[in-house]
Amino acid sequence: MSDTPKGAPKKPAPKQNMAGRPRTGSRVAAIQALFQSDINGEAAETVLDQFIRYRIGPDAGGFEDGRVPQADVPLFTKVVRGVATQGDSLDAILQGHLQGEWTVARLDPVLRALLRAAAYELSAGSEPPARVVINEYMDIAHGFFSGEEPRFANGVLDAMARSLRAPEFQK
């Protein structure tokens, strides 16, 4: 018998191990939760509860099962709630940094969740530094994708960071 809530979709799992990095684990879990909320139309609070109860923690299993053994729960909660409450403004920011005929809706759902989470962190203040946010989400992108998606994400993340945190890049 599984401890996963009945009807929960199989969440994407990164291909590399992020063990020993709770803040990275929080971001991985946030991307998975945002993906689930987006795909199933579930409320952020419902998904947060499911993840905190069944998918995060030492008894949660491993990444290959869509679980995150180590995660900073306050950071995870902050990112998911932030994206949920500021979704329209974050999508506008994201859309402003997509090239050509790309739209937020056209993005792969995992990539969309990753970029929304990063947009939230970049727009929510000055900590962590923009370069740290970019590096964290790039590590995660490489864990989820093996094609051109990480390169695409890097371009969008860099453009968003330079726009939202311009003073950090003038040093």
Image (cartoon, rainbow, N blue to C red):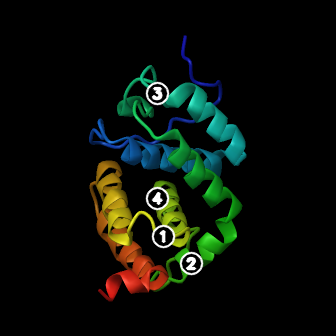
Camera-nearest residue between 10 and 166: 166
Q: Residue at x 57, y 36 (%)?
A: 9
Task: Give the SS element for disc 1.
Answer: helix
Residue where numbered disc 4 is placed: 114
Q: Quadrant of the C terminus?
A: bottom left
Name the amino acid, label 3. Gly
Q: Position of residue 116 (x, y in %)?
A: 53, 63
Q: Position of residue 30 (x, y in %)?
A: 51, 48
Q: Which of the marked residues, 4 or 2, is nearer the chain's N terminus?
A: 2
Extreme-bottom residue of the structure = 170
Q: Which mark is residue 93?
A: 2
Q: Quadrant of the N terminus?
A: top right
**Other residues around mark 1 within 10 Å, as few (<14) / some (14–19) / many (≥20):** many
Q: Which mark is residue 57?
A: 3
Q: Are marks 4 and 1 in contact (CB under 8 Å)?
A: no
Q: Is residue 33 left or right of residue 132?
A: right
Q: Which of the marked residues, 4 or 1, is nearer the chain's N terminus?
A: 4
Name the amino acid, label 4. Leu
Q: Residue at x 29, y 37 (%)?
A: 20
The alpha-carbon separation of the residues under discs 1 and 3 comes to 26 Å
Residue where numbered disc 1 is placed: 122
The alpha-carbon separation of the residues under discs 3 and 2 comes to 33 Å
Q: Residue at x 40, y 85 (%)?
A: 167
Name the amino acid, label 1. Leu
Task: Give the SS element for disc 2.
Answer: helix
Camera-nearest residue between 171 and 41: 171
**Other residues around mark 4 within 10 Å, as few (<14) / some (14–19) / many (≥20):** many
Task: Give the SS element for disc 3.
Answer: loop
